[in-house]
Image (cartoon, grey):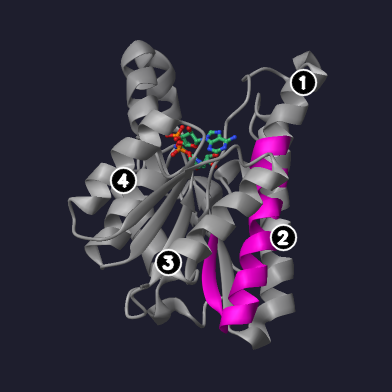
Amino acid sequence: MTDKTKKVAIITGGGSGLGLYTALKLADAGVNITIVDISEAAGAAAVQQLEAKGVKALFVQADVSQPQDVKHYVDQTVSTFGTIDMFFNNAGISGPGTRFADNTIEQIEQVVGINLLGGLYGLKYVLEVMLQNGGGSIVNTSSTAGLVGQATVGSYSATKHGIIGITKTIAVEYAAEGINVNAIAPGTTETPMVKQYRQDNPETFQAVEAAIPQRRLGQPEEIAALVAFLLSDEAKYINGVVVPIDGGFTAQ
Ligand SMILES: NC(=O)c1ccc[n+]([C@@H]2O[C@H](COP(=O)([O-])OP(=O)(O)OC[C@H]3O[C@@H](n4cnc5c(N)ncnc54)[C@H](O)[C@@H]3O)[C@@H](O)[C@H]2O)c1
């Protein structure tokens, strides 16, 4: 039997970083969660942490760039929990970190496949369920690179601009049917991966921090708090916006 008093969230890329921190934050509010990730180890570890907080958690391994995997995680969530109230459409990769002409076609296709097509497929299948069930709330992960140009992340930047385009479109198309959708645009955030990179490249990071008006990186807890708010009923009238969370970086 599904528990209809509990909200249900799907979080892609939920095994690590921003997805995992958001899952833990939503679990504190009693939300049951499907963790979607390509990494089985990360997904299983996330489920353990969520269950320890007393909520129900399901892991579905998926490569979000594959439409059949995306349909599968949506179907599995509905058959396990009965509905989808919240969708954090977040899985992404950063790409090779070279100037654009130095990318291979395969590198371009990989970043677009995961970050943009993966996000679009997720929206298509989740929207079908939300429309049937009377609504829901969605947050898409863009980036400061979805708002301004940043050297060496061309394909990534294109996908993150695209995520903002689909966010605004869906906001307009489905607002009257109980669905609100917004995007977040984080600056560089101190996830475990970034922390390691910072330890290995302290000088690069001094320059990154110096370019941020608040002179520090974002913390994953800060992003999770924003996403949890945007997915909550309190934020239901916020629709189609992009919220930068970047210490003032894109205000310059
Ligand atoms: N950390 C930052 O500084 C930052 C800044 C702006 C935007 N973002 C965006 O936030 C999102 C999350 O990034 P993060 O920093 O938490 O990264 P992360 O690497 O810690 O987490 C991403 C998760 O996505 C999973 N994943 C990767 N490819 C996948 C695929 N094809 N299918 C399913 N899962 C896949 C990974 O296994 C990982 O668990 C991304 O979209 C990223 O572009 C991050």
Residue 137 on the magenta segment: yes
Look at mark 2 in the image and give the residue it sits on: 166
Amino acid type at image mark 4: Val
Image height check: is 86 above or below 134?
above
Q: Is residue 148 visible?
A: no
Mark 2 to mark 4 CA distance (whole Å) = 30 Å
Tell me the crowding category of disc 3: few under 14, some 14 to 19, or many 20 or more residues within 10 angstroms, Cα based.
Answer: many
**N-term-proximal mark, 4 vs 1:** 4
Q: Is residue 17 visible?
A: yes
The CB of the residue at mark 2 lies under 8 Å from ligand 1: no
The CB of the residue at mark 3 lies under 8 Å from ligand 1: no
Dots 3, 4 in contact, CB < 8 A? no
> Which residue occupies 57% across, 38% down?
92
The image position of residue 46, as x and y in percent, is 32, 42
Mark 1 to mark 3 CA distance (whole Å) = 37 Å
Image height check: is 80 above or below 210?
below
Q: Secondary structure at mark 2?
A: helix
Image height check: is 11 above or below 173?
above
Dots 2, 4 in contact, CB < 8 A? no
Look at mark 1 in the image and give the residue it sits on: 106
